[in-house]
Amino acid sequence: MAGLTAATPAVLERARRLVEPSLVAAVDRLCDELRLSARYHFGWVEADGSSSTAGSGKGLRPALAVLSAEAVGVDASTAIPGAVAVQLVHDFSLVHDDIIDGDVERRHRPTVWAVFGVDDAVITGDALHNLAFQVLLEAPDPLPTEERVRATTRLVAATTAMIAGQAADMAFDDQPEVDLAACLAMEADKTGALLGYSASVGAVLAGAPDDQVDALEAFGRELGLAFQAVDDVLGIWGDPAVTGKATGNDLRERKKSMPVAMVLSAGDAAADELRAIYDVDGDLTDEHVVRATSIIETAGGRDGTVTEARRRLDAALAALDDVGLAAGAVEELTGLARFVAERDF
């Protein structure tokens, strides 16, 4: 995990240039009271409304949407409504997650709630969620096309799963122990569902055959688990200068992420010692975090999570075989997937 092993895929920037104008136009339709906080969250402006170069993240979901259209042989522009919609849903979840977790920084700048207050952040997230479905259901004709209705129905299902995953993650806080199977099920919903949608929505909007749509969705779901496994490693061992979060941030928050669940599931002395640290009254000290990090690494939690990320990457790539997808798009999907599983941010 130390350092990127491949250059940033060109499709991330290509998709950003293609999708961002429509994303900006959608966000600019929000009411006056919410437009500034939404634009601030996306990194387009500062809190006072002046222009910003902060940027809006990696853009993985729009890139997957664009490639899913190209994979079934249609122009990338077909995916734009789906790419905008899934990005809006993702960002609604980020705005709300920052409130839930009490995070005061994202992408190296203060979070929406830290700048505008909890009330404004909650309603901003709500507005982004609603806007996603507006974007998908809009069409030049009086009624949305069958493909747009199908894409909307699938987004409802993916968002429902994502919210269920977030609820399960929150419930873990009150459970003394979480096993690996429960952790994987939570992460499949919280992260995998929306990436599965992202990786198939372009094909859905193109009216592609079910076997191709299903293969692309399976690719995205498995990639989501690889993505989350990497995130879980970075949440403990990531470089703060790169991730924008303090070292051991997930441990400080007592998150039962994949490396933690692997150790707790073992039921041995390491599990007992880690559980004892998590059960300490009050905030965890730096010493607690350092000790917990050492326990997890020595007990194999880090290596096991890296192995799980690679296993899920292999499963994602295998899903793209033998369904007649365009070779060039498959090549780019493969490069993007490897980048996700090897990143250090």
Image: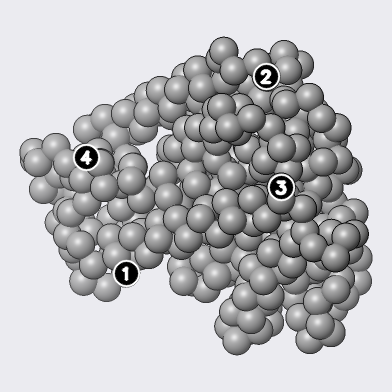
Query: What secondary structure is marked by label 2?
Result: loop
Query: What secondary structure is marked by label 3?
Result: helix
N-term-proximal mark, 1 vs 4 = 4
Give the quarter of the image for residue 329. top right
When the figure is inspected, residue 135 is found, relative to residue 12, above or below; the finding is below
Tell me the mark number nearer the camera, choosing from 4 and 3: 3
Q: Amino acid at mark 1?
A: Asp
N-term-proximal mark, 3 vs 1 = 3
Please name the residue shown 57% across and 63% down the image. Answer: 93
Tell me the mark number nearer the camera, choosing from 1 and 4: 4
Q: Amino acid at mark 2?
A: Leu
The residue identified by callout 1 is 283
Q: Nearer the viewer, residue 124 or 157?
A: 157
The residue identified by callout 2 is 325
Do the CB atoms of the residues marked 1 and 4 lie less than 8 Å apart?
no
Q: Nearer the viewer, residue 177 or 151?
A: 151
Tell me the mark number nearer the camera, choosing from 3 and 1: 3
Q: Picture coordinates of residue 50 (x, y %)?
A: 91, 71
Do the CB atoms of the residues marked 3 and 1 lie less than 8 Å apart?
no
Tell me the mark number nearer the camera, choosing from 2 and 4: 2
N-term-proximal mark, 3 vs 2 = 3
Tell me the mark number nearer the camera, choosing from 3 and 2: 3
Query: What secondary structure is marked by label 4?
Result: helix
Query: What secondary structure is marked by label 1?
Result: loop
Q: Picture coordinates of residue 188 (x, y %)?
A: 41, 44
Residue 270 as seen in the image, left or right of residue 243: left
In the picture, the disc for residue 147 is 3
Question: Which quarter of the figure is the C terminus placed in?
Answer: top right
The residue identified by callout 4 is 263
Any part of residue 57 in sight = no
Give the quarter of the image for residue 287. bottom left
Q: Picture coordinates of residue 260 (x, y %)?
A: 28, 45
